[in-house]
Amino acid sequence: MEERVRVHKVRLGGDEFRVIRPEPSSARLALRDDHHWLSMYVDRAGAERLVALWSLAARSARSLIQLPIRANPAPEGVAGVTGVVGDGEPVALDLVLLHHSLRFPTARWKPVRSRLDTGRPQTTATPDRDFPDEDAIDHARRAHRSYRDHLAFDIAAHTLFVVGSPTAFRETGTALRGLVDEAPSFPYRYPHAGHFCVELDPGPWARIRNRRPLPATLHIQYSADWRV
């Protein structure tokens, strides 16, 4: 799978940051903070784009991968995970994927974002089997106190930051591949089962301090019939 991106370099004080953003396309993705959960919606092209960028994040230890989707409307008739809107109106968010080894202070994202130029166009290849098979993942080890390959979430400047190690991105990417491989045929195989979704939870070891508790789950819903 190939993804056309633009690579930006931003200098802020004595630091330089590398930001990768996908080129605009017809792919549909939207992300909302519903206050009790994080709700993301993707169509087929959007699912392919999300999986490609997740793979890129696993291999790009020195880059911030930004998906600027804050202006995108959510599909008509959706209201979060349970079908009930949380306290207050949902807040539209962009998405940034990055490695925890960067130790990027999310409070600096707003000035970094404001300095992004047109960038340098590039085509990046993401291998079809960049993620392990489900039966190759040892889920039991995630309960060990010494385990460090969880994801962490943070929200700043109307952006959800998903932070993790290469292993964390690859192993959660296995679940995301279901949005591409299984979701399109799901309504035909299970006509009464409702929507197809993937849920990602942050781990306990790297919860980033925030002004309020963050929603505990990122719920990603496949929306084939996207109407706005």
Image (cartoon, rainbow, N blue to C red):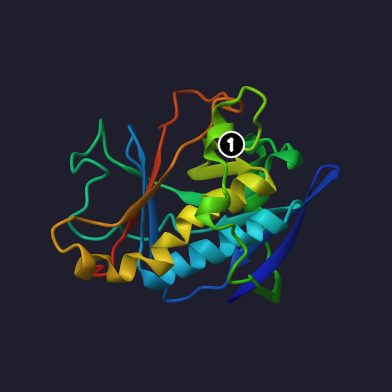
Callout 1 crowding tier (Cα within 10 Å): few <14, some 14–19, many ≥20: many
* Residue 114 horizontal/vertical position (percent): 63, 52
Q: Disc 1 residue type? A: His
Give the left or right position of residue 223, taking residue 63 as reference: left
- Depth check, front residue: 131 or 93: 131
Q: Which residue is mark 1?
A: 150
Extreme-right residue of the structure: 14
Q: Quadrant of residue 119?
A: bottom right
Residue at the front extreme of this rendering? 135
* In the rendered image, the vertical position of residue 149 relative to residue 210, given as above or below: below
**Along the line of sight, the residue nearer the viewer: 67 or 114:** 67
Residue 194 position in % (x across, y down): 19, 55
Left or right, 92 with reference to 176: left
Judge by depth and name the residue closer to the eye, 95 or 190.
Answer: 190
- Residue at 57 percent across and 42 percent down: it is 138
Residue at image x 41%, y 68%?
181
Residue reaching furthest left? 192
Above-or-below relation of 87 to 89: above
**Residue 118 visible here:** no
**Which image quadrant for residue 76?**
bottom left
* Quadrant location of the N terminus in the rendered image: bottom right
Quadrant into which the C terminus falls? bottom left
Residue 46 in view of the camera: yes
| Left or right: 82 in relation to 42 | left
Secondary structure beneath disc 1?
Answer: loop
Q: Vertical placement of 92 versus 225: above or below? A: above
Give the residue drawn at x 59%, y 33%: 141
x, y percent for residue 152: 56, 36
